[in-house]
């Protein structure tokens, strides 16, 4: 039997912790049990009660206040230190997660993008969850929609997403958060970008039109074209929107993630064939 989890990642302030608390509320409303892990040693506030909290093992504050000269860090180095400390003490996490079956966990991760794009910490953690606990993991990568509403930013965000996807090698959903903050026109523009994203070459055409005469864009046209070709050749990056002002938005996203990790499939079989039992 399996266990299931979402690893909620993404840049600082992109809405990871808010997503986790909204997901928790949504699940309570529909009568579904999920467990939340705060995996951010620097967290000061979040609006849910975690079942497991990494700060009980180590917090950023502990590291910054430590008088030992050999571990003098600023906040960013300190956070990486905390995450590496967690990896060296995975038996702590093991004891917190216990030996569940068919249970569903959500990991609220720190906002340092390098943890996902090139450091080994998160990859090591995910591999441990898969191999040691039999977790089926999906990475849910949040991006603030405001960072992605013009073509150049869209390419930048897509590159960050691609980098995390190839590094972590798990089922992946890129989520554009805070869509409720966009006005009607911006929402229409976003739909346009998401359509363009289906074909990166259309996106490139759009980018060139958008920036006609711009010296920077002219100078770096070959580079931009190469990036767009790279995204195209992988064909991996897509985005799903999350609009907390829309009633079904969270349910749609959850259904997508569940299907990736095949959560509830056994349940479906039982529901579809209730009379088959014993027979
Ligand atoms: N309107 C709106 N605001 C949001 C949404 N998601 C997050 N926010 C706001 O964005 C800010 C950052 O949200 P967090 O959930 O703390 O972001 P985070 O990714 O956990 O941040 P770090 O843990 O610091 O990396 C907060 O002020 C949230 O209230 C959303 O869907 N809609
Ligand atoms: Mg957070």
Image (cartoon, grey):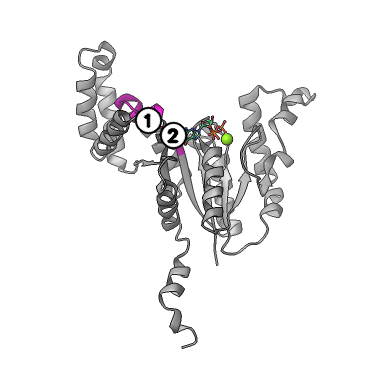
Q: Position of residue 203 (x, y in %)?
A: 24, 31
> Marks 2/1: CA distance?
8 Å
150 in the magenta segment: yes
Out of 213 and 106, give the one closest to the viewer.
106
Tell me whether the residue at label 2 lies in contact with that at label 1, contact meaning CB atoms closer than 8 angstroms: yes
Please report the bounds of the magenta region as a residue range: 142-156
* Residue 182 disc label: 1
Out of 186 and 208, give the one closest to the viewer.
186
Quadrant housing the N terminus: bottom right
Out of 179 and 42, give the one closest to the viewer.
179
Which SS does the magenta portion mostly show? helix
50 in the magenta segment: no
Residue 247 in sight from this viewpoint: yes
Q: Position of residue 17 (x, y in %)?
A: 56, 38
Asked if disc 2 is less than 8 Å from ligand 1, the answer is yes
Left or right: where does residue 13 sit relative to residue 96?
left
Can you tell which quarter of the image residue 212 is in? top left
Bin the neighbour count of mark 2 within 10 Å (Cα to Cα): few under 14, some 14-19, many 20 and up.
many
In the rendered view, would you say 69 is above or below 266? above
Point 65% across, 46% down: residue = 50
In the rendered view, would you say 31 is above or below 19? below
According to the picture, the residue beneath numbered tag 2 turns out to be: 178
Residue 120 in sight from this viewpoint: no
In the rendered view, would you say 179 is above or below 77? below
Left or right: where does residue 11 sit relative to residue 74?
left
Mark 2 residue element: loop
Q: Position of residue 5 (x, y in %)?
A: 54, 53
Out of 45 and 137, give the one closest to the viewer.
45
Q: Position of residue 102 (x, y in %)?
A: 56, 63
């Amino acid at each position: 039997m399996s266990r299931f989890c979402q690893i909620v990642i993404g840049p600082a302030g992109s809405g990871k912790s808010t997503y986790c608390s909204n997901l928790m509320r949504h699940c309570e409303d529909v009568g579904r049990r999920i467990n939340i892990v705060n995996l951010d040693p620097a967290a000061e506030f979040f609006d849910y009660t975690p079942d497991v909290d990494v700060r009980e093992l180590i917090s950023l504050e502990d590291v910054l206040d430590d008088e030992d000269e050999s571990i003098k860090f600023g906040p960013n180095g300190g956070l990486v230190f905390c995450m590496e400390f967690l990896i060296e003490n995975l038996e702590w996490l093991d004891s917190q997660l216990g030996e569940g079956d068919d249970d569903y966990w959500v990991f609220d991760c720190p906002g340092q993008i390098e943890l996902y794009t090139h450091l080994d910490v998160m990859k090591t953690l995910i591999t441990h969850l898969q191999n040691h606990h039999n977790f089926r993991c999906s990475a849910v990568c949040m991006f603030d929609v405001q960072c992605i509403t013009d073509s150049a930013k869209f390419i930048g965000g897509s590159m960050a997403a691609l980098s995390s996807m190839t590094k972590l090698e798990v089922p992946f959903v890129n989520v554009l958060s805070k869509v409720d903050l966009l006005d009607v026109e911006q929402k229409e523009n976003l739909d346009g970008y998401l359509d363009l994203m289906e074909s990166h070459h259309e996106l490139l055409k759009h980018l060139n039109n958008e920036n006609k005469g711009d010296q920077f864009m002219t100078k770096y046209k070959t580079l931009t074209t190469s990036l767009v070709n790279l995204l195209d050749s992988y064909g991996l990056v897509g985005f799903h929107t999350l609009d907390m002002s829309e009633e079904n938005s969270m349910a749609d996203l959850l259904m997508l993630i569940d299907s990736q990790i095949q959560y509830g499939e056994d349940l479906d079989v039982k529901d579809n064939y209730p009379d088959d039992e014993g027979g």
